[in-house]
Image (cartoon, rainbow, N blue to C red):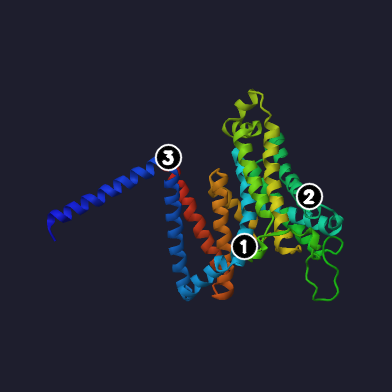
């Protein structure tokens, strides 16, 4: 080949690389998208290597994953429905994090929400309520229960300076064990035992308390929790950016001492932030119960609260980022379940794959922060 032609091509490649780098530096959104895409790609390559190591054909594993995540309208609907719980917990985390509070109690708040929604649906007389109140009241009760469970660490933080990471985590353990107690005791929520084979779970909630479906004709099996979550996310974004409460949260996070001297209600901000985070997580529990599971079980929360915590961390304070990460985790969860059932991929490996994706995305976020600094 002509040396001059080779030199010209190399100069052209370097020029295109410089142009692409300049575009990415001038467009933060594009840079974020590139880093996230590269992180996911690297994580997927590592996941494929692990799948090959355990002896599962990669083609079969990928086919099972795709079929479970988006292989049919029903699979897409199931993935989106799973994403709603992650999005709600993640949104609550972002609200609390605006005040530099770290809510790690989403799992417990979600469990408390599920308990409250089950109790109201079965024994609160909600089945006979008109105008959609039959399913709205259990949702509101779950949100209120979650707000109470999140507000307690807020009070401890504001009044006694207790570390909210410790208090929310410990309350989460209490909530999970309370859930086990509820489904094991007939005095509480366990269904009546008719034989030794009766499972430790509640009765199925009445049909009027189940969430109505949307786009039912398409076979996607979505429920009304989707528009509810979208509306709440928009409201949360407006609250954080346009309201006095959002300003108080930001001030509390940047400099709480100066904010107190300026007369801002720091106690209300701290308690309100964690109570709102708990309310969102409690509502997530109601959506899981009323929109999908329909009965309370010992493994009801299934780690959704902790996954929602990761979603909130990866979102880096952005409500839009919450939904992007929630969709990723929702499709990963659906595809992973199908890989386990169809391709015999060990469940532990599915969790490892999710962990690899999380670590890769977190590493990308750190790289972005260093580049910004």
Location of the N terminus (image quadrant)? bottom left
What residue does disc 2 label?
Answer: 141
Under tag 1, what secondary structure? helix
Pick whichever of labels 2 and 3 is earlier in the sequence: 2
Identify the residue at image location x=66%, y=24%.
263
Q: Is residue 142 above or below residue 41?
A: above
The reply to whether discs 2 and 1 touch (Cβ–Cβ < 8 Å) is no
> Foreground mark, 2 or 3?
2
Residue 267, given in percent of the width and then of the height, sits at 70, 32
Crowd tier of the residue under label 2, counting other residues whose Cα lies within 10 Å: few below 14, some 14–19, many 20 or above: many
Label 3 sits on residue: 372
- x and y percentages locating residue 289 in the rendered image: 73, 59
Q: Position of residue 108 (x, y in %)?
A: 70, 53
Mark 2–mark 3 Cα distance, whole angstroms, equals 43 Å
Nearest the eye: 2 or 300: 2
Is residue 51 depicted above or below 170 in this figure?
below
If you read the primary sequence from the N terminus, does the residue marked by circle 1 or circle 3 appear first?
1
Q: Spatial distance from mark 1 to mark 3, Cα to Cα?
A: 37 Å
Q: Is residue 301 shown left or right of residue 330?
A: right
- Residue at far top of view: 262
Residue at image coords 58%, 68%: 72
Where residue 299 sits: x, y (%)? 70, 63
Observer able to see residue 105: no
Q: Earlier in the sequence, mark 2 or mark 1?
A: 1
Rounded to the nearest angstrom, the CA distance separating label 2 from label 1 is: 26 Å
Number of the label disc, if any, that sits on residue 99: none
- Secondary element under disc 3, as helix, strand or loop, is helix
Crowdedness near tag 1: few (<14), some (14–19) or many (≥20) residues, C-alpha within 10 Å: many
Name the foreground residue: 275 vs 207: 207
Which residue is found at the position 82% from the left and 64% from the top? 190
Q: Residue 160: which quarter of the image?
A: top right
- Quadrant of the snapshot with the C terminus: top left
């Amino acid at each position: 080949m002509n040396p001059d032609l080779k030199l010209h091509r190399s100069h052209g490649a370097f020029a295109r690389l410089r142009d692409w780098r300049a575009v990415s530096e001038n467009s933060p959104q594009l840079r974020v998208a590139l880093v996230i895409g590269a992180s996911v790609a690297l994580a997927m390559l590592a996941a494929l290597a692990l799948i090959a190591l355990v002896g599962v054909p990669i083609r079969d594993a990928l086919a099972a994953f795709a079929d479970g995540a988006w292989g049919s309208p029903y699979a897409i609907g199931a993935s989106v429905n799973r994403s709603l719980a992650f999005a709600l917990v993640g949104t609550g985390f972002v609200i609390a994090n605006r005040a530099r509070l770290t809510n790690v109690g989403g799992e417990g708040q979600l469990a408390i929400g599920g308990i409250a929604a089950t109790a109201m649906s079965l024994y609160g007389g909600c089945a006979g309520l008109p105008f959609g109140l039959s399913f709205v009241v259990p949702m509101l009760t779950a949100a209120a229960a979650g707000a109470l469970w999140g507000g307690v660490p807020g009070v401890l933080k504001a009044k006694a300076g207790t570390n909210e990471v410790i208090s929310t985590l410990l309350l989460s353990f209490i909530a999970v064990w309370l859930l086990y107690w509820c489904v094991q005791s007939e005095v509480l929520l366990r269904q009546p035992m008719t034989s030794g084979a009766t499972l430790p779970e509640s009765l199925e909630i009445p049909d009027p308390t189940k969430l109505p479906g949307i786009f039912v004709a398409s076979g996607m099996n979505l429920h009304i929790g989707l528009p509810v979550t979208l509306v709440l996310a928009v409201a949360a974004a407006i609250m954080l950016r346009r309201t006095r409460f959002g300003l108080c949260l930001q001030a509390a996070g940047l400099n709480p001492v100066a904010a107190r001297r300026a007369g801002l209600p720091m106690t209300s901000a701290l308690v309100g932030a964690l109570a709102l985070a708990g309310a969102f997580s409690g509502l997530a529990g109601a959506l899981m119960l009323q929109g999908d599971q329909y009965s309370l079980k010992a493994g009801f929360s299934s780690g959704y609260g902790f996954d929602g915590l990761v979603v909130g961390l990866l979102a880096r304070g952005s409500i839009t980022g919450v939904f992007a990460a929630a969709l990723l985790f929702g499709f990963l969860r659906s595809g992973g379940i199908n890989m386990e059932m169809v391709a015999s991929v060990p469940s532990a490996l599915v969790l490892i794959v999710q962990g690899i994706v999380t670590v890769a995305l977190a590493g990308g976020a750190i790289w972005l922060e260093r580049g910004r600094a």
